[in-house]
Amino acid sequence: MRFGLFGTGPWAHLAHAPGLAAHADVEFVGVWGRDEVKAADLAGQYGAKPYGSVEALIDDVDAIAVALPPLVQAPIALLAARAGKHLLLDKPVAFEPAVAEEIAAAVADHDLASVVFFTRRFMPAVQRFLAQARQTGGWVEARVDHVGTIYDEGNPFGASQWRRDSGGLWDVGPHAVALVLPVLGPVTEVSAMVGAHDMSHVLLRHAAGAISTLTLSVDVPPKAAREEAIFAGEAGVLVVPPQPWEPVEAFGYALDDLLGAAAGTRQPDLDVRFGAEVTSILAAAAAAAGTGRTVSLG
């Protein structure tokens, strides 16, 4: 499958570009970026072609991979879907639920494959854990703490303006929501508060009755950093196994899902419809934190 990469930032360098280049069933065609010099440099590292036009790269490929901020990603994804191209998007799909729904509708209308790159959700150990938790059932709560800093020395994401503006809710929040949804099911109510260090505290009521608690930040003192997740219920307490951060390996699994979906041999759990659901929950959390009111979904 012929792929075009949109984006030249740290995530394009750490995951997308090497992942595309390493996959045996992918032809890495070209790179577009908002900085033409960076696009040429990244493309040159992998024998791909730099493109000066979004439309030209979309025209030359079968699928796109996007490593761009949500506000830039969304219109490119919509343009590509309407042109009949498969989508491998980054999280969150968009900031606005209506925009994410529009992309999902375009994918459905054109019978396209789509995958959203919720990094560790693609790792086999996490997939096995979630399948076991789903089969066990009887859960009354989940707790996810995804708390750290992107502003420590040498962190490539600290200069990312959209992360600075949107904070942990939109940066690491998608990962937390993507972890609880497959086990606890759809969300019906959302409450939230934001404290010091952009610490977002989110409560989700799930349709089956369980409540999940998410603590999210990308700007805490280093000693306060932690990444933990548990499910609790009739079977006791299950701890989500910690996973090494292997972005290229995870991206390879995401590509496997997209290629399989395009061939009609698998249905990815983490498609753009799922991504739109995550966007609606995070937007509700932002609204709840801003108004002090619980937001109903569904």
Image (spheres, grey):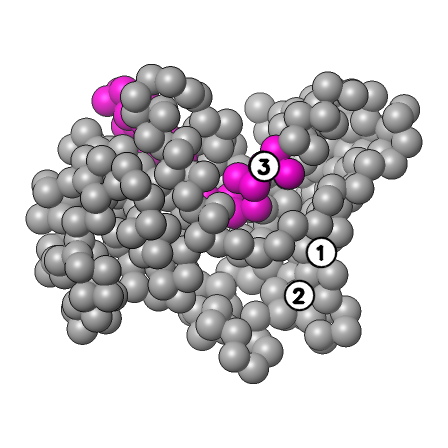
In the rendered structure, does residue 125 fall within the stretch colored magenta? yes
Amino acid on which disc 2 is placed:
Gly
Contact? badges 1 and 2 (CB < 8 Å) = yes
Badge 3 or badge 2: first in the primary sequence: 3
Quadrant of residue 46 within the rendered picture: bottom left
Closer to us: mark 3 or mark 2? Answer: 3
User: Where in the figure is residue 137, as x and y percent of width and height?
Assistant: 78, 21
Residue marked by disc 1: 227
Closer to us: mark 3 or mark 1? Answer: 3
Image quadrant containing the N terminus: top left
What residue is at 69 percent from the left and 71 percent from the top?
220
Q: CA distance from mark 1 to mark 2?
A: 8 Å
Amino acid on which disc 3 is placed:
Pro
Q: CA distance from mark 3 to mark 2?
A: 24 Å
- Is residue 194 at all visible to an observer of this figure? no
Q: Is residue 264 left or right of residue 189?
A: left
User: Where in the figure is residue 280, as x and y percent of width and height?
Assistant: 52, 37
What residue is at 63 percent from the left and 45 percent from the top?
176
Amino acid on which disc 1 is placed:
Glu
SS state under label 1: strand
Characterize the local packing of mark 3: few (<14), some (14-19) or many (20 or more) Cα atoms within 10 angstroms.
Answer: few
Badge 3 or badge 1: first in the primary sequence: 3
Q: Is residue 190 left or right of residue 31?
A: right
Q: Which residues are magenta?
A: 103-127
Residue marked by disc 2: 148
- Is residue 54 at all visible to an observer of this figure? yes
What residue is at 43 percent from the left and 21 percent from the top?
267
Residue marked by disc 3: 124
